[in-house]
Amino acid sequence: MPRTVVVTGGAGGIGRAVAEAFLARNDRVILADRATDRAKDVADRIGADHMALDVADAASVDAAIAELEHRFGTVDVLVNNAGLSGGAGALVELDVATFDNCVRVNFRGTFLMTRAVGAHMLTQGVRGAIVNISSIGARQPTPGLGHYEATKAAVDALTRSAAIELAPHGIRVNAVAPGPVVTPMTERLTTNPEARRRWEARIPLGTIAQVTDIAPAVAFLASDEARHITGAVLQVDGGQLLT
């Protein structure tokens, strides 16, 4: 029976690849994104649904849950993919607005969606799955990205807390932690041959990931094949954390 899968930030990058991975499993997928025109365009192209959502706004999240219940009944899988870096800079020089925006989307947004969808699953008796998109930066710092990496460390902690609280209800919560991935957010890195060469020198498998390297791990953690896995943070980094 098809599941209802919500992918936040689903209009591009990793989100689109994740959506396509679930569609390939015959699930119903909703792309939830602030970029509503782009989400609609992508949804039309890949055969998904779409809806407007600002993950960092509590009222927007509550409205989205109400809409999802009205349109689809229950949510079986949530993928907390929406995220940003907002810029780069040493912590002692970082603009506070950049820090606040990163925390607002990456951490607050993941919390609000986990809180709302988790409560929905409890109320509806759904033995569902939540998969958060983290980063190996939560465990391996890169100068200039401390603000972003701190939010991902917080996502890892939230993943474990939600997993232990929701486990008695049959709801599993896990995370996937990519290394660098070729997406619009990393364009400045991946399109600069020298910068890309330096980064790939840190990766034992020798290449920066494509979005299609990340999506299968997300689909797996949300599947029955992973029914005995919760609270895990699965790194998909070409071995970078080994260095």
Image (spheres, rainbow, N blue to C red):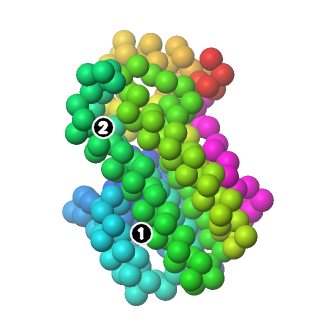
Q: Does 205 appear in magenta?
A: no
Counting from the top left corner in percent of width and height, residue 31 is at 38, 64
> N-terminal of the two: label 2 or label 1?
1
Q: Eyeballing the image, is 211 above or below 204? A: below
Q: Which mark is drawn over residue 30?
A: 1
Kindly tell me whether residue 73 is visible in this rendering: yes
Amino acid on which disc 2 is placed: Phe
Specify few, some or many for label 2: CA neighbours under 10 Å numbering under 14, 14-19, or 20 or more. many
Q: Residue at x 36, y 45 (%)?
A: 103
Image quadrant assignment for residue 206: top right
Q: Eyeballing the image, is 165 above or below 3? A: above
Counting from the top left corner in percent of width and height, residue 58 is at 33, 67
Count of labels shown? 2
Cα distance, mark 2 to mark 1? 29 Å
Q: Do the residues labelled 2 and 1 touch (CB within 8 Å)?
A: no
Q: Nearer the viewer, residue 20 or 63?
A: 63
Residue range in magenta is: 225-238
Image quadrant assignment for residue 48: bottom left
Q: Nearer the viewer, residue 159 or 205?
A: 159
Q: Quadrant of the C terminus?
A: top right
Q: Eyeballing the image, is 226 above or below 196? A: below
Q: Which mark is drawn over residue 147?
A: none
Q: Mark 2 points at which residue?
A: 99
Q: Which residue is drawn at 56% across and 83% down?
A: 123
Counting from the top left corner in percent of width and height, residue 199 is at 46, 18
Q: Which residue is drawn at 57% across and 76% down?
A: 121
Q: What element carries label 2?
A: helix
Amino acid on which disc 1 is placed: Ile
